Amino acid sequence: MPSKDKCYNQVVRALQKANWHVPPEPHSIYVPGKRSPLLADIRAVQNEKTIIIVEVKCFADNIFHELYTAIGQYLLYRSILKQAGSTLPLYLAVPVSAYKDIFSTIAQSVVEEIRMKLLVVDMTKEEIVQWIE
């Protein structure tokens, strides 16, 4: 199983504070023709009907490398979910600092162009501060 980003637990607690149920296992994304699925970090459920998939990125180290990885991973997951007929929305959870430093500045046009959904989390308060559709 892949390792979790350092801020994974804060994102889980932020979702839980917002009344989402977060099972401990990641969400499996099955690739046609492959035995092993890709694993998105979180499958969160609210009101037993609303389900979202969340990939967590902390942007703690090499910001540009993590940005490349996050965008590529997001697009790959979203494409495979669509191919499988899934209508579950996919979000990229990021810290407030990463949103301010990266996603509302240098990566803003990319986020808009690919219609990336973001979940902006205050990691200190462990609260969701913004949902970006």
Image (cartoon, helix red, strand yellow):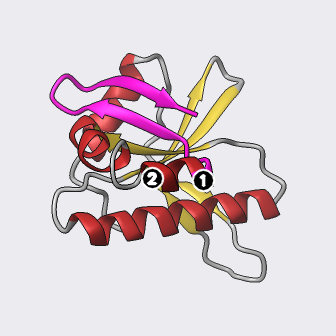
On the picture, is 61 further left or further right than 80?
A: left
| Residue 130 in the image: above or below residue 120 | above
Quadrant of the frame with the C terminus: top right
> Which residue is drawn at the image coordinates 40% and 54% (left, top)?
107
Closer to the N terminus: mark 2 or mark 1? 2
Residue name at image x 67 percent, y 26 percent: 50
Residue 56: horizontal and vertical position, in percent?
38, 50
Please determine whether, in this image, residue 40 is positioned above or below residue 96: below
Q: Which percent across, then down, holds residue 49?
A: 71, 24
Q: Is residue 15 left or right of residue 82?
A: left
The residue drawn where x is 26% and y is 46% is 98
| Residue 116 screen position, x and y as percent | 56, 48
Q: Which residue is mark 2?
A: 41
| Residue 26 visible to an observer of this rendering | no
CA distance for labels 2 and 1: 24 Å
Q: Which mark is residue 3?
A: none
**To which quarter of the image does residue 5 belong?**
bottom left
Residue type marked 1: Glu
Towards the viewer: 35 or 130: 130
Q: Amino acid at mark 2?
A: Asp
Q: Nearer the viewer, residue 96 or 125?
A: 96
Residue in the foreground of this view, choosing between 124 and 29: 124
At numbered mark 2, what does the secondary structure look like: helix, strand or loop? loop
The magenta stretch is: 113-133
Name the residue that disc number 1 marks: 113
